[in-house]
Amino acid sequence: MRLYSTNSPSHGHPDYVEFGEAVLRSLPADNGLYMPENIPVLDDGFWQEWKTLSFHDMACRVVSTLLQGAIPEDTLNEIIGDALNFPAPVVTLDNQHRVLELFHGPTLAFKDFGARFMARVMAWLTRDDDHTLTVLVATSGDTGGAVASAFHNVPGTRVIILYPSGKVSGLQEKQLTALGGNITALEIDGSFDDCQRMVKAAFLDEPTARACNLTSANSINISRLIPQMLYYFESARQLETPPVFVIPSGNFGNLTALLLATHMGLPVTQIVAATNVNDVVPEYLKTSQYTPRPSVATLSNAMDVGAPSNFARMRELFGDDWKAMTENITGFASNDVGTRAAIREVYEKWGYVIDPHGAVGYLAAKAWLANHPDDTTIILETAHPAKFPETIAEELGPDVLEIPERLACLASEPKVSIPMAAEPDALIAWLNQA
C-alpha cells in the first residue's frame, strides 16, 4: 500500500511512501494528509457472504483488501482480534431511527476503535526499534482518553495529550489526566483548533520531530481511519436496504472513514454530516465556500472544531468536485437549545438516553426523514451519555443515568496536567526539554 500527500504539487507524479512510514510519520512534510494511492473495491466473493461472516472475519477481509499486504495476514488477524474485542450494536428506536452504539470499548467512545488498532499497528512497526516513540495528540474530548488508554504503559512509547482548558467534561478530563505513567496531559489555554495547530507545528519542525521521534494519534493519521470503516460495514449489513448514515462530526475523520468504505463498495443511500454551531462543512455544502474560523464551545464538545483537518481528504476523495460531494453528503447544523430538546425528545419517545453528540445526530436524522420518510437512518452514538452527567441530569433528572464503574472510579482521582499557552513555540520548547 502506497500513500501520497493531499498537498502533492502534482498528483500525477507524487512522492509516495509506504504504509508504515505514513503511520509513523503521521503528517507529510508539506502539511498535507496521507491518502492511499488507490482504494481497492471488495470483490464479488466478499459481497456474496459479507452478511454471514463473523465481525472479525469481515473486518480482516476489509482491512486486508485495503492494506494490500502492508501487514502480514496472521499479524493483521491478531491485531484486529486484540484491538476490536468489543461490540458495536445497532439499537432500533423505530423503523426509521436506528442508533449505532460505538461506546462499548474501554473508554466508552468510538475513538477506541481507532486508538486500539493504531497502538497495536505502531507496536508492530517499531518492534525492532530501540528509540522511544512520542505519540502527540490533540483532543476536543474523547480522542485523548482513548489514546491514553490504548497506549498506557506500552513499552517504548510516551503519549503527550493537548486539550483545551475548561472545554472538556469533567470525566473526559480525568480520562486524560489521571492515568500517569507514560501519559502526560498538557492543558492548553485555548481551543481545540489551537491544540491541533500546535501539534501540526511540532511535526513540521523537522529537528523536533526527528529528535523526539514524533507520531500522531489524531485522525490526521491514516491508521486511525482504517478500523473506523468497519462499524459501517457491520451496521449496514444488518439492514435489508442501504441506510442513511447520520454522523455527528467535528474533525470529520469518522465521516472520511465512511467515504473510504463507500469507495471500497459499501452501499449507502446518503451521508448526513451533523454538526453543532461549528458548521464550516455544512456551510461549504450549501455555498461551495469553505471558511474555517475559530471554534465555539458547545455541549457537544468533541465536535467543537472550526478547521477540520479531514476536510482535505474529503475534497481529495471527490476530486475537489463540490457538486459530487453535495450529491453524496448533506450537511446539518444545530445549536445547544436544539441539542437539549433532542435529549428530552428521544427519552420521552423511546426511553433511550442519548448523549449530546448523538442528540445532534438525531436532529439531523429528523430533518432528513421529513423529506425522505421511507428511508432508514443509522445515527452514530459516539460516546456514552455518562460522560456528560451534568447535561443529562439537567434534561432528564439526576437518577436516569448509572455511571459505568470504569468512569466512576476516576471521579476521585487527582487531575495531573501541565498548563501551557496556546503557542506552537511553547510546545516545541517543552518537547525539546522534556
Image: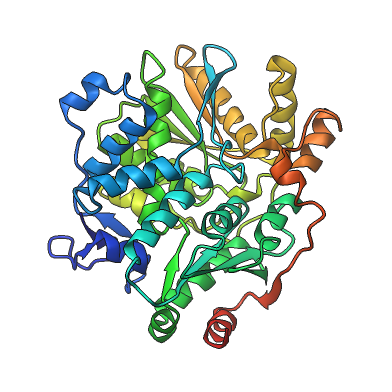
Task: Please identify the residue farthest to the left as the structure is shown.
Answer: 13
Q: Which image quadrant: the N terminus?
A: bottom left
In the drawing, does residue 12 fall left or right of residue 31?
left
Residue 226 location, x and y as percent?
36, 46
Q: Is residue 107 above or below residue 45?
A: below
Residue 223 location, x and y as percent?
37, 53
Q: Is residue 402 visible?
A: yes
Residue 350 location, x and y as percent?
68, 16
Q: Is residue 200 above or below residue 55?
A: below
Kindly identify the residue that appears in the image at 66 percent across and 66 percent down: 180
**Which one is nearer the viewer's eye here, 387 or 329?**
387
Residue 429 location, x and y as percent?
56, 86
Kindly identify the residue that appears in the image at 36 percent across and 15 percent down: 241
**Which one is nearer the viewer's eye here, 194 or 153?**
153
In the drawing, does residue 198 fall left or right of residue 312?
right
Q: Quadrant of residue 352?
A: top right
Q: Quadrant of residue 381?
A: top right
**Which one is nearer the viewer's eye here, 179 or 143?**
179
Kindly identify the residue that appears in the image at 51 percent across and 35 percent down: 86
Q: Which image quadrant: the C terminus?
A: bottom right
Q: Is residue 69 above or below residue 352?
A: below
